[in-house]
Image (cartoon, grey):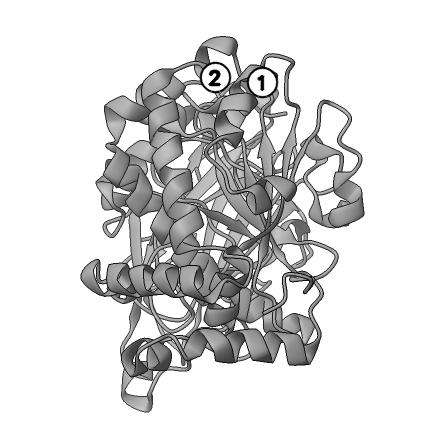
Amino acid sequence: MSASVDVDNPTRAQRAAAIEQLRDKLSDEVNSYCSDLDVWRFSVARQLDTEKAAVMINAWYEWRKQANVDELAVAQPDNENPVPCAVRGYGAVADANVTAGIGADDAQLRLTRTLGGGCWHKRDRDGRPVYIERAGRHIIKDIPKTSSTSGLVEFHVLLQEFLTRTLLPECSQLAEQTVWQQVVVIDLAGVSLVALSHIPALNMLREMLARDQMLYPERMHRTYVVNAPPVFVTAWKMIRSWLDPRVISKIRILGKDHAELLDQIPAHNLPSFLGGSCKCSHMPGGCVPSVPLGNYPDLPRSAYAHLRHQVLISYTEPRHSFVCETMPVSNGPTPMSSPLMGYAGWLGIKRDSPRNSAPTSPVPMRTQHVFVRFSTDRGRGMVVEVLWQPLGSDSDDGILVYPEALFEPQRAPVLLELEAPNRAGQLVVNWRVANFDEGQAPFPRPEEAQIPIQLEYSVDTEDELLTAFSLPPIKRS
């Protein structure tokens, strides 16, 4: 095909011709496996050179079969697999952070504690998913100690498969056209010269980039490297030598003035630390949780293994409430040992106890920051709402401190952070089973809907939580 074809804006006939020419070079087995989009991506990656593209796509096909890539446990609406990294603003999976649940991979957890924090955070102006990486917060020297190069590549493959199988189909549906690329924002705020020159980590990066270009070509629409310090110039000269010229053409290196991001991503979808207006205050860690930055509690697996309360709910009795008294922070922190349990309607509180729980007297609790940990053994998601009622109030209505939000604790335990008014009152945490029109998880079969759902949870003050698991103070921005 003529090299004069603009691969970024081909005509329908030019694209069809390129796909047909490459398919003529492939076996029936490979052709049946590949979509037209796959064929087009590899064609573009080799500038429509069908011979080179055929070699590339055949190697990709063999790798996927040998590595059993299609069998990876990728989080999708129809399964209960945990998400590979933080997610904000999608429907295929609920907003989530990576937590150390039973299904969490140890290698992935180790990486989470050394990487600066990554999150698929909403969409750009054209409906593409946006991935944000706080690379400047990576603990560079620890990455080679906690993961091998192959382990890092495997983790990256899982991220790419989650993108292609879960996020891109949803984005395509919402945009009413095929969305097949993502936008990447790499934030270098906090990076040091030592980090940029750490050879073992750079070697791992080089291998990951090589695999990415060979195995997931044309999945990136644009990459923005922001808050790049002057010392990055030296590292970039080396890194760009590892990249295909077409990939380099899609990368924008920006300093502290990165207002250009707003041309790509609307302000309400861009985190405030990058110049947008989004804060994702409903999630611990905000828009992009970061263990090295310390903006949310990195709880160990034991923190979710034995939660304090267990109750059974169902699709016919779908609600449960937790009630405890609160006192002003100025009175000092007080431990919460046996809070009042109550089974409630969605807003009103009844004093009769749910099954598997015993009522006790309310216990004062520090309320400035409260954390809720919870998980379920099945189901299609839980909706959480938190209210606060002034002490002595005759009204059944409360002040909304956490509006309704859908979570999927059947995938992995959920950790929520609440901030209640600094006054004496009652905190009411309400759970209910997600309705059939909430989320994208499939409806249970009639026989499955008869099986009770076990909800386990604990509610703690910030001091209690951090002390119990020997964690440092949370750094909130």
The residue most toward the front is 2
Reading the image, the residue beneath label 2 is: 196
Q: Which secondary structure, mark 2? A: helix
Residue 424 in the image: state x and y as whole percent.
61, 34
Against 38, is 338 above or below? above
Residue 315 in the image: state x and y as whole percent.
40, 78
The residue most toward the left is 66
- Please tell me which residue is depicted at 58% across the width and 79% down the height of the picture: 17
* Cα gap from disc 1 to disc 2, whole angstroms: 7 Å
In the image, what residue type sits under mark 2?
A: Leu
Residues at circles 1 and 2 in contact by the CB criterion of under 8 Å: yes
Relative to residue 190, is residue 110 drawn left or right?
A: left
Q: Determine which of the numbered discs, if any, sits on residue 291 in the image.
A: none
Q: Quadrant of the N terminus?
A: bottom right
Against 74, is 393 above or below? above
Q: Nearer the viewer, residue 29 or 462?
A: 29
- Please tell me which residue is depicted at 43% across the width and 72% down the height of the picture: 318
Crowd class of label 2 (few under 14; some 14 to 19; many from 20; radius 10 Å): some
In the image, what residue type sits under mark 1?
A: Phe
Query: Would you identify the image quadrant in which residue 201 lies?
Result: top left
Against 267, is 12 above or below? below
- Please tell me which residue is depicted at 25% across the width and 22% down the height of the picture: 145
Q: Quadrant of the C terminus?
A: top right
Q: Determine which of the numbered discs, if any, sits on residue 232 in the image.
A: 1
